[in-house]
Amino acid sequence: MRVIGDDGEQLGVMDIRDAIRAAREKGLDLVEVAATADPPVCRIIDFGKFQYEAKKKANEAKKKQVTITVKEVKFRPGTDDHDYSYRMKHAREWLEEGDKVKATIWFRGREMTHRELGARILERLEKDLIDVGEVESRPRMEGNQMFIILGPKKHKSAAKAEQPAAPSVKPAPKAETNKPEQPVVASNTPEPKVESNKPADAG
């Protein structure tokens, strides 16, 4: 088998017994890393540390994954204002938390002939949540239900942050205008050395 040292050095093709002996001498393990290679490749490593680092990398990869949940809020064609406000409030909270919202209108029996009532509710919901959500899927029918999918709106906080930064640059040139005040102070230094003192020495 081909053996790689713990520092990445190629130790060449070795007998398995010699490879195991070399690993034990360093207090490490001999781990097969490429079984299908010809000859198979083994590496001398600290297997416990190797497993720990592999698990740590896997956990870090999971943390970087953004999981977005789709939560559903249900209405009826005859949903009153109170129930609508209650459900709309929950939808707003979900969008603010970064989740998607599926708003569904359920129709029963003859209600299917008044689909426009459901469309109005979804249109109203879209307008009420325009500041926190945006439509990802327009209203459509599936069986006896009409639904719309709203996703979290990307706030342009970066653009707002740039606006206060502009005035902070303007005071810089004003500070330069104060520099001429320094020569004014320097002009006071000759005053102690008044030439009127010289005639006093002459007299």
Image: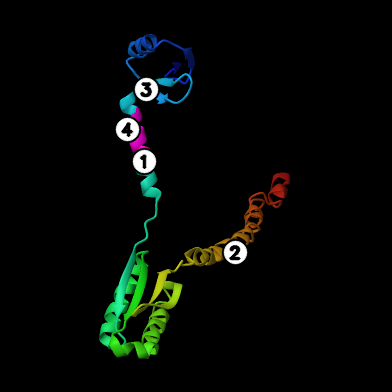
Tell me the crowding category of disc 3: few under 14, some 14 to 19, or many 20 or more residues within 10 angstroms, Cα based.
Answer: some
Specify the quadrant of the image occupied by residue 109: bottom left
Q: CA distance from mark 2 to mark 4?
A: 53 Å
> Which residue occupies 58% across, 61% down?
169
Q: Which mark is residue 58?
A: 1
Percent across and percent down for residue 17 are 36, 10
Whether residues under marks 3 and 2 lie with C-beta atoms below 8 angstroms apart, the answer is no
Q: Is residue 115 visible?
A: yes
- Residue 87 lies left or right of residue 187; in this view the side is left
Residue 125 lies, with reference to residue 136, above or below; the image says: below
Foreground tag (3 vs 4): 3
Q: Earlier in the sequence, mark 2 or mark 1?
A: 1
Q: Earlier in the sequence, mark 4 or mark 1?
A: 4
Q: CA distance from mark 1 to mark 3?
A: 20 Å
Q: Earlier in the sequence, mark 3 or mark 4?
A: 3
Q: Which mark is residue 52?
A: 4
